[in-house]
């Protein structure tokens, strides 16, 4: 019998569908072939029998003959795909294809949620440093805005109350810049002994897909605005006095263009930069040392809302802080949360101008 073809009729005629192996002595005379063809077969179905005349083909499927020349092949695809065998640990079922796809989707969702829940920054400092930074920042914010800048203004011979709308706008811009520089100086001083910081801290990146996260965050602005109206209505129900109109709103009502430009710089440039550095850049990642990421986002958002010292805007600011925290956590980019913060402040500023 020729060892290179199964089509040449052998001296003893074989029955169709049955392959009888030659005796060991005859097999030893045949040349040894070190390759074997692999024929893809469906996972489970009926198909023509693959007959091999090669000695070393050992992957024999479990088959059953029904007398029609076709054999039921159950393991052809599994034996030809070891990765599938190892991953699934059994024979795939074509009838369960939709279930398998759905199960894969569910597993992917669970892995995404688990990864988001357990995602953490490498935090080299402890809660003592976190408390120290936040306490010093609040103290500096209060001292600069309520004492240092007013004292310097009084020493220069004027006070905020006697200034024009443009003067008050310039006063607010100087105060905001001073507060921001004080906060950055505190961070620089308190975290100096931990430099160089691990990767992922205070990153600003122009590249990436963070623009889509910002766009999705903007879609939630109407909900933030709705929460603002609800919060104001709840405050009006209390017996205490409602907080007064801010100097920004007074300047807008006066329609002073120079003052409006100065205030626009304050609310859309200065405030988003240093607030995001403190709350999303430092506080949120630091909290992941002690709690999962979602709780870190929520707690940093609550601190962000309370730092505005305005009971009328607590609910919308907490929700806005959660949105900005989520955008920052997804992108690991402070620029993304700064842009979103700036867009929200600009949205509020334009709404006040109506």
Image (cartoon, rainbow, N blue to C red):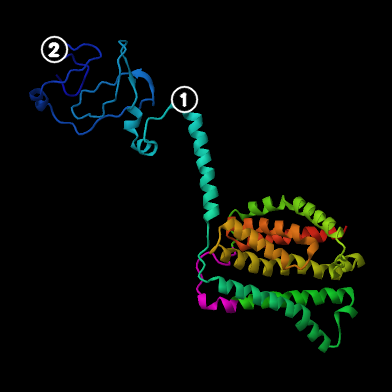
Numbered disc 1: secondary structure: helix
Position of 207 relative to 47 (above/below): below
Position of 4 relative to 235 (above/below): above
Residue that appears at 13% across and 12% down: 12
Q: From mark 2 to mark 1, how far is it between C-alphas?
A: 44 Å
Position of 246 relative to 80 (above/below): below
Residue that appears at 88% across and 78% down: 161
The image position of residue 326, as x and y in percent, is 63, 56
Q: Which mark is residue 95?
A: 1
The image position of residue 91, as x and y in percent, is 37, 30
- Number of marks in the rendered image: 2
- The residue furthest front is 239
Q: Which mark is residue 318?
A: none
Residue that appears at 83% across and 60% down: 235
- The residue furthest right is 254
Tell me the quadrant of the picture where the C terminus can be found: bottom right
The image position of residue 1, as x and y in percent, is 14, 19
- Which portion, as a residue range, is magenta? 188-204
In this view of the protein, which residue sits in the foreground, 165 or 233? 233
- The local crowd at label 2, few if under 14, some if 14 to 19, many if 20 or more residues have their Cα within 10 Å, is few
Residue that appears at 86% across and 88% down: 157
- The local crowd at label 1, few if under 14, some if 14 to 19, many if 20 or more residues have their Cα within 10 Å, is few
In this view of the protein, which residue sits in the foreground, 165 or 126? 126
**Residue 29 located within the stretch drawn in magenta:** no
Residue 334 figure quarter:
bottom right
The image position of residue 229, as x and y in percent, is 82, 54
Disc nearer the start of the sequence (2/1): 2
Q: Main secondary structure of the magenta part?
A: loop
Numbered disc 2: secondary structure: loop
Q: Which residue is mark 2?
A: 12
85 displayed left or right of 256: left
């Amino acid at each position: 019998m020729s060892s290179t073809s199964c089509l040449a009729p052998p001296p003893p005629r074989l029955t169709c569908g049955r392959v009888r192996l030659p005796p060991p002595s005859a097999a030893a005379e045949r040349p040894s072939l070190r390759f074997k063809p692999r024929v893809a077969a469906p996972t489970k179905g009926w198909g023509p029998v693959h007959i091999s005349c090669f000695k070393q083909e050992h992957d024999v499927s479990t088959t059953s003959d029904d007398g029609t020349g076709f054999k039921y092949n159950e393991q052809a695809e599994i034996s030809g795909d070891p990765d599938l065998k190892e991953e699934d640990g059994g024979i795939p079922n074509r009838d369960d294809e939709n279930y398998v796809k759905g199960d894969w989707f569910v597993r992917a969702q669970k892995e995404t949620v688990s990864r988001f829940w357990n995602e953490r920054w490498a935090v080299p400092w402890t809660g003592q440093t976190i408390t120290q930074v936040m306490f010093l920042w609040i103290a500096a914010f209060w001292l600069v805005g309520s004492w240092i800048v007013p004292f310097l203004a009084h020493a220069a011979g004027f006070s905020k109350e006697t200034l024009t709308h443009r003067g008050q706008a310039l006063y607010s811009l100087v105060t905001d810049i001073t507060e921001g520089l004080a906060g950055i100086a505190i961070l620089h001083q308190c975290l100096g002994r931990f430099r160089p910081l691990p990767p992922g801290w205070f990153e600003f990146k122009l590249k990436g897909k963070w623009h889509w996260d910002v766009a999705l965050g903007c879609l939630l602005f109407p909900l933030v605005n709705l929460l603002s109206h609800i919060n104001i209505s709840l405050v009006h129900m209390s017996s205490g006095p409602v907080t007064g109109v801010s100097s920004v709103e007074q300047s807008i009502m006066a329609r002073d263009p120079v003052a409006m430009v100065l205030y626009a710089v304050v609310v859309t440039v200065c405030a988003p930069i240093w607030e995001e550095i403190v709350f999303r850049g430092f506080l949120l990642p630091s909290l992941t040392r002690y709690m999962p990421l979602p709780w870190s986002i929520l707690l940093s958002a609550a601190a962000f809302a309370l730092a505005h010292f305005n009971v009328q805007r607590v609910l919308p600011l907490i929700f806005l802080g959660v949105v900005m925290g989520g955008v920052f956590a997804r992108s690991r980019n402070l620029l993304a949360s700064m842009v979103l913060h700036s867009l929200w402040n600009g949205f509020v500023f334009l709404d006040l101008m109506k």
